[in-house]
Amino acid sequence: MKKEALTGTQGSSLIILYLTGNAAIMALGSAAKEDFWLAIIGAVFLAWIVTLQLSYISSVYPGKNLFEICESLFGKIIGKFFVILFTFYTLQTGGIVLRNGTQFININGLPNTPIMLLMVVIMFLTVYLVKNGVKVMGRWAELLVIIFSLAIIILIIMAMPKMNLENIRPFLYRGIKPVIVSTFYTFGFPFGEIVTFSLVFSTFEKGEKVSKIYRNGLIIGGAIMLATSLCSALVIGVENMNATYYPTYFAATKVSIKSFLQRNEVVIAGVIVIASFTKTAIYLLASCIGIAKLFNCKDYKFIVTPVGIIFMIWSFNLFKSVMELREWDLAVWKEFSLVFQVVLPTFIFISAFIKKKIRGVSI
Amino acid sequence: MFVLVLAAFIVIALLEMVPLYKGKNKKEFILYCSLYSIAFILSMLMSFGVKLPSVANFIKVIVMFVKKGFKVE
């Protein structure tokens, strides 16, 4: 498969947008109530451990993505089975991301427009971005991450007069257990999803350390999500934050500077939709690479359009409403994500570690 | 609705399938045609108003089955 190298900044920017894509509008760590911020920090720490595993795996197999590593590590047959599993995961999770993003537009901006139409428009752009390759995606992320961060910083500065510190007190009132439970939920969405990144991006320019790229992306992405969640909680309160589907958007509606600067939520919605689109593109790219790998094809670009259409139909039929999506999330997501974000990467990590010990440095 | 879907698929086929066929890579062409056929059939079914099953429900059934096996609350 042809490889395109990313710079470190492009890699970190993609991770930031990928992590914050849908999560920046949602309530993270809601089970911990006032201590949600502890759950977010805990989830970043857990994700950091996963990225250490992923960095180790890519240091053992430099220049190879996780699909290729699975084949090298486990042989053709078992390797292909892993490829099928990860491709299924990317299609399913990517479908949820696309559904979430379009549902957000539908609920808040265009209530009379059919979701399918929104999906077609987003998928058209996604297919175009993926067809142009990883390098273009990296450049796009490098530019967008600045606009995204600026919009969030402006929101926080404007929201400062409306913030009330009492909203996140008392500290650890319900004990540590809800924080731990919530940490695992927050790890499952969105931090653990960083595994998908290793399925897609494997080649970086010379001198770039993979672990550093992951670490920078994770810390900045985590900081952005901590900031948006704190902003929402301080402005609208923890109860309101947990009761609404999109608390950051709701908090932004409350922010204004007299009558001079209003409707700040439109800017927030815009940047979040664009970040969500980037996340969808990464999932589509991963699905295409997985399918191409499954059939031993040298390139993935020629199948982007049909896979994009299947991806869109898959996503459209997943859930009928936002309530059904949330219900599924609560009932299934924790276990489903655990398999693909913790169990399989740890298994691959242990296998790579043992194989390296047995066969020496060159595998 | 289905006329629109059909028209879109004809345009995509002309733009993508023809160059792929001329490229003489048989394996890539077969893979493309297979995926394209799946996409086409699913799109046509949807345009006729057929309700397709959700993969999410399928996953839910499996997860609930495993949870029951391990007796996870």
Image: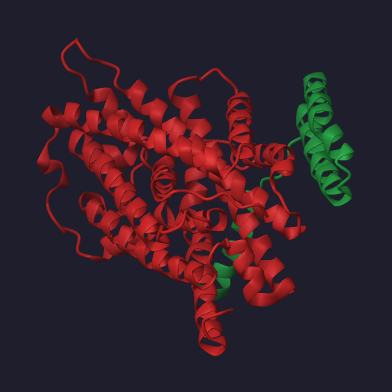
Would you say A297 lies left or right of A351 here?
right
Q: Position of residue A354 (x, y in %)?
A: 52, 85
The number of numbered badges drawn on the structure is 0
Q: Residue at x 35, y 63 (%)?
A: A48
Q: Nearer the viewer, residue B16 or A205?
A: A205
Name the residue furthest bottom. A358
x, y percentage for residue A4? 57, 49
Q: Which residue is found at the position 24% from the left and 24% from the top?
A: A254
Camera sees residue A51: yes
Residue A68 in which image quadrant: bottom right
Q: Is residue A260 above or below residue A295?
A: above
- The chain drawn in green is B
Q: Quick one: which residue is furthest to the front in this view? A: A206
Please report the residue visible at 60 percent of the width from the left and 51 percent of the height from the top: A286
Q: Going 81% across and 39% down the picture, which residue do you hit?
A: B36
- Colour of chain A as rendered: red
Is residue B48 visible in the rendered image? The answer is: no
User: Residue B67's x, y, as percent?
Assistant: 54, 68
Q: Quadrant of residue A163?
A: top left
In this view, A25 is above or below A184: above
Q: Who is closer to the viewer here, A91 or B12? A: B12
Residue at the outermost top position: A259
Instruction: Give the percent coordinates (x, y) of residue A139.
Output: 47, 38
In the displayed structure, does residue A99 sit left or right of residue A311?
left
Q: Describe the colour scheme in one phrase.
A: by chain
Q: Is residue A7 left or right of residue A70?
A: left
Image quarter hosting the N terminus of chain B: top right
Residue A244 relative to residue B48: left or right: left
